[in-house]
Image: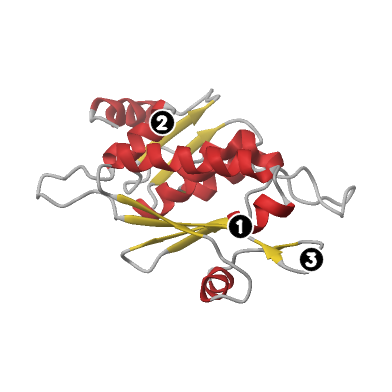
């Protein structure tokens, strides 16, 4: 596992100053039609084995805060109904039956996140996808990020010359907004928002002296 994944999993069971656990316990249901795949989709077995072994590592590092339930949803069974209820996307086989290979995650607050189907082209992003899913359930309250940048990452609106639309927002910003509450800070501002948890400076320049002082104080205060 990467250092980032280990850090997230280990922090799930840590406690704050009042003795409260920082993370929520998470349950992952791995729906994999192993019986059908063995006969009709053997190419998925390698990926299924990797997913299963990776999840075993997650469980070991999370130290009791993560449970994995493996389910083989046979056709017309209660397990298949459960898979459908969780939004798993079945792949039709030549026999007319549906093959399932997805993950449904839940926490103690009725939160739910899913990967409806584990796509082979996404194999290189497997750990990223799994860790993102676990993180969103273990820490459902998103941190607020103050973003200060002079780059056009938010894209540009439509203009008279280009009524169909300007440049789209950067992919990076879309990913950031998926994990955090992002508040953009104008470079002409003279103070930082009081309620941000993190401050991101991306190619900052020509900032107001008062704002530079505020950033300095934020860093000195442990931000």
Q: In this view, does 54 lie above or below 73?
A: above
Residue at image position (80%, 51%) is 158
Tell which of 84 and 108 is nearer to you. 84
User: Please, which colouring scheme is shown?
Assistant: secondary structure
Return the residue at label 3.
95
Cα separation, mark 3 vs mark 2, equals 42 Å
For the point 35% across and 55% down, the residue is 26
Q: Name the residue under label 1.
A: 35
Q: Dots 3 and 2: beta carbons under 8 Å?
A: no
Q: What crowding class fits label 1: few (fewer than 14 Cα within 10 Å), some (14-19), or many (20 or more)? A: few
Q: Is residue 191 visible?
A: no
Can you name the residue that lies furthest to the left here?
A: 18
Task: Identify the mark nearer the N-term, 3 or 2.
Answer: 2
Secondary structure at numbered mark 2: helix
Identify the residue at image location x=87%, y=54%. 163
Residue 217 in the image: x percent, y percent?
28, 29
| Cα–Cα span, label 1 and label 2 | 34 Å
Residue 151, image x and y in percent? 63, 31
**Quarter of the figure that contains the C terminus:** top left
């Amino acid at each position: 596992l990467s250092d980032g994944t280990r850090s997230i999993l280990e922090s799930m069971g840590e406690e704050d100053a009042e003795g409260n656990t920082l993370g929520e316990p998470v349950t992952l249901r791995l729906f994999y039609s192993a019986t059908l795949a063995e006969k009709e989709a053997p190419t998925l077995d390698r990926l299924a084995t990797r997913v299963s072994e990776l999840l075993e590592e997650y469980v070991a590092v999370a130290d009791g805060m993560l449970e994995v339930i493996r389910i083989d949803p046979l056709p017309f069974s209660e397990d298949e109904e459960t898979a459908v209820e969780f939004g798993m996307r079945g792949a039709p086989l030549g026999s007319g039956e549906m093959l399932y290979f997805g993950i449904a995650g839940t926490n103690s607050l009725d939160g739910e996140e899913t990967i409806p189907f584990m796509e082979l082209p996404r194999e290189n992003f497997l750990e990223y996808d799994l860790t993102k899913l676990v993180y969103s359930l273990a820490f459902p309250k998103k941190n607020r990020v103050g973003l200060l940048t002079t780059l056009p990452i938010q894209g540009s609106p439509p203009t008279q010359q280009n009524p169909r639309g300007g440049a789209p927002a950067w992919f990076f910003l879309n990913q950031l907004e998926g994990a955090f509450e992002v508040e953009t800070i104008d470079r002409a501002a003279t103070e930082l928002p009081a309620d941000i948890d993190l401050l991101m400076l991306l190619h900052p320049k020509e900032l107001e002296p008062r704002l530079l002082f505020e950033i300095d104080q934020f860093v000195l205060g442990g931000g």
